[in-house]
Amino acid sequence: MAKNIIRPVKGTVDFYPDEMALRSWLYATIKDVSESFGYEEYEAPLLEALELYAAKSGDELVKEQSFVFEDRGGNMVALRPELTPSLARMVAQRQNELVFPLRWWSYGPFWRYERPQRGRTREFFQWNIDLIGVDTPEADAELAAVAARFFERAGLPSTEIVLLVNSRELMDSELERIGIPPENRTDVFNLIDRRDKMSPEKWEAFALDSGLSSAQFEGLQSLLEDDDLWKQSESLVRFFEASDAFGVSDYLKFAPNVIRGLAYYTGTVFEARDRDDEFRAILGGGRYDNLVGDVGGDPLPAVGFAMGDKVIEHVLAKFGRLPGPETLRRPPVLVTVFDESSMSASIRLASALRSTGLNTAVYPEPIRLGHQFRYADRTGARFVAILGPEEQANGQVTIKDLRTGEQETILSGEAAEYLNGRMGE
């Protein structure tokens, strides 16, 4: 009778070594890009008081998507569904001690109670990066430039990826112009945000059922089809000028239908898509100038974005840009064990190689060399070091390159230099 293996919690992720290697590569790339712009790494708790999200992230995120429970003290807490409210809380707590503007970034786990599907799991990792204390279009453009440089580093050019940009302020003024009152703006922003998720017929029906008149709906449609609308916004004009100075304008495009769903955005908003529009947003963010004040601090301007790990992995796979084993892990060296009497010599050789920076494993028992070679090949080793009786007697070691099939016998004392030289080939 087959064993009943306990399954992981629905929507969570197991990171086997191959998946963990990709996660580590993604983290390292994010770290390099973030720090190249002068951003510092930080982290926040995985648990937060529910009220932190209930006030500012929108009802849908709290009521439908968050993992919420009562702790033993009777407090309502949530596994963090996003990081920006935590960031605002942290800044508010030490506002008088921090040096502004802040440039902070983080990469860690989050949870949302959603239906698992392609590119979306309940547990995921997310890059968050924010610039706090500056209220300029140039600051907004800096964040867009960070995103573009990440795509460059990941091997995704502007012919494959686009950053779609809009302004909540611009759209707010345009909605006023077409007669939509302030109390209905949030509903209309949500309506705009759903436009790409519905057919034109269903979207129109939804808009009219939501209370828009035919004239207002026609005005909204005209607004969303005006590709030059950004020229009426001084802040967007400056944003695109700064983006050109950053050298990333080829990634950018004005998109009046981009609103971003979260309630706290106040100005520029943007999201990245693959140009085939096959996937949901790769990353998204914008300006949020009220959040620090709303969690108890003095008001501070801020702009930032977040990128989850799942969609970017699918995009990299689509374009054949997933890093290979030689990028994800430096191929290790496997030192074989000829027999029991050779075990100590093999361990000493592995230790000597490891001390020079070579990732080196020694096979843990003296079994057939053919089995050890197969193990080395299946685990991604590039080189196998063989210490047979003849090599040991002559102070030598035989190195076999599993990639080329070549092998060479050299002095044991020269093995580290030889292998380090070959690793770059």
Image (spheres, helix red, strand yellow):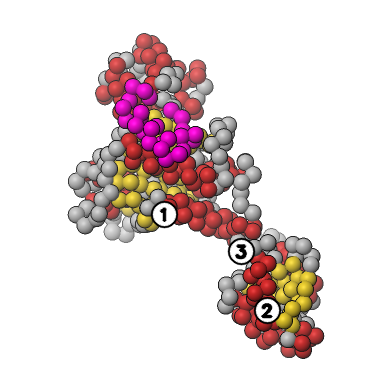
Stretch in magenta = 230-254
User: Mark 3 near mark 2, Cβ–Cβ under 8 Å?
Assistant: no
Q: Relative to 390, is 254 above or below?
A: above
* Residue under label 1: 35
Q: How far apart are marks 1 and 3 (CA)?
A: 23 Å
The amino acid pointed to by label 2 is: Glu
Q: Which residue is drawn at 34% across and 50% down?
A: 103
Q: How far apart are marks 1 and 2 (CA)?
A: 38 Å
* Residue under label 3: 330
Give the SS element for disc 2: helix
User: Mark 1 near mark 3, Cβ–Cβ under 8 Å?
Assistant: no
* Residue under label 2: 414
The amino acid pointed to by label 1 is: Glu
Give the image location of residue 385, x and y in percent.
72, 75
Q: Relative to 382, is 300 above or below?
A: above
Q: Which of marks 1 and 3 is nearer the N terminus?
A: 1
Q: Locate residue 350 relative to residue 241 in the image: left or right.
A: right
